[in-house]
Amino acid sequence: MHSNEIMKKKVLKISFQGALGSYSHQASTKFFKDPLVVPCDSFEEAIETVRKGKANKAILPVDNSTYGRVADIHSLLPASKLFITAEYFLPVDICLLGTKSSSLKTVTTATSHPVLLGQCKQFLKINNIKPISGYDTAGSARLISEENNQLKGALASKIASQIYGLKILQANVQDNKNNTTRFLVMEKKPKTLINQQKKIITSIVFQVRNIPAALYKAMGGFATNNVNMIKLESYMLGGSFEATQFFVDIQGHPLDGSVKRALDELRYFTNKLDIIGVYKQSSFRDKYS
């Protein structure tokens, strides 16, 4: 085998939603060493790229400390048939970008993804800049670069300014200076972790049975077994107001005695329960423990 063929085999391909210069692109380069990035138009495409073997892993944003959860992503996770193998927290430095001839005084509109616009409400209001919803952050930067209008700006990353030849009119414009986005790394196969390892997160999706107080009783198993639940999200299935699915992150390995007992109790009150990830807790969480 030739050396260039060996090198080709070792390239790690990472898919994400958004254009080059997006925060998912930035997360990819921060978390992985020299990845070959695969930009995708949608979360579904990023997931499908991994399922078809065109990428080794996908990195997907799920929550932002200022804005909250990323819409639709939790409902895609169980249907993806992929597994969560890692989490990564990216501090989000939002920049107001403009053309070479523009300035903070000339810009009257700022285009970006709605999630990013929601993180800069105070800055936009103070500077009398009208928010314009765009397809994504980097895509908005690319659009502003193509239009080359000094009245129009974009909210995006520093890396986007470099890629699309824009000027940083002001950095750190996010309202919350501790603004952080949590990303999940998704793969075809689950990561094998021994239950002796410390600081493990188990991610679960489940549907409760249609009986009175089913959710209350199902959650009770975590309390009685002293299992720490660090996330609970709910969302409707198939547009139905009756069918609800829950996404839960807990601390501990499924084979830990306390976690195993809690899951056994949870199963009794559910129609469906899937463990979609067992992975190491990010060291970022240590700041708040």
Image (cartoon, grey):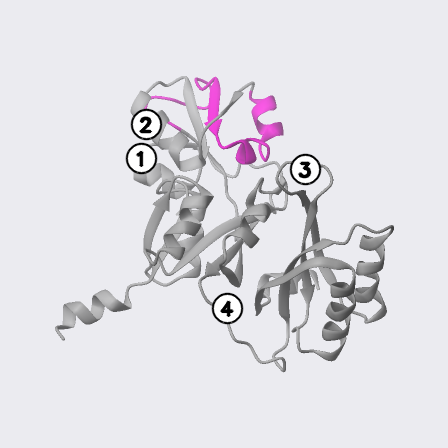
- Give the CA distance from mark 4 to mark 2: 41 Å
- The nearer-to-camera label among 3 and 2 is 3
- The nearer-to-camera label among 4 and 2 is 4
- Give the CA distance from mark 2 to mark 1: 6 Å
Dividing the picture into quadrants, the one containing residue 2 is bottom left
Residues tagged 2 and 1 counted as in contact (Cβ below 8 A): yes
Which residue shows up at 59% across the image and 48% down it? 74
- Circle 1 is placed at which residue position? 164
Which residue shows up at 82% across the image and 54% down it? 214
- The nearer-to-camera label among 4 and 1 is 4
Give the residue type that dot 3 points to.
Ser
Q: Residues within 10 Å of mark 4 (few under 14, many from 20)?
A: some
Q: Is residue 212 left or right of residue 152?
A: right
Give the residue type that dot 4 points to.
Pro
Q: Earlier in the sequence, mark 3 or mark 2?
A: 2
Quadrant where the C terminus is found in the figure: bottom right
Which residue shows up at 78% across the image and 64% down it? 268
- Circle 4 is placed at which residue position? 190
- Count of all numbered marks drawn on residues in the image: 4
- Front-lying residue, 28 or 278: 278
**Helix, strand or loop at disc 4?**
loop
Percent x, y for residue 119? 59, 35
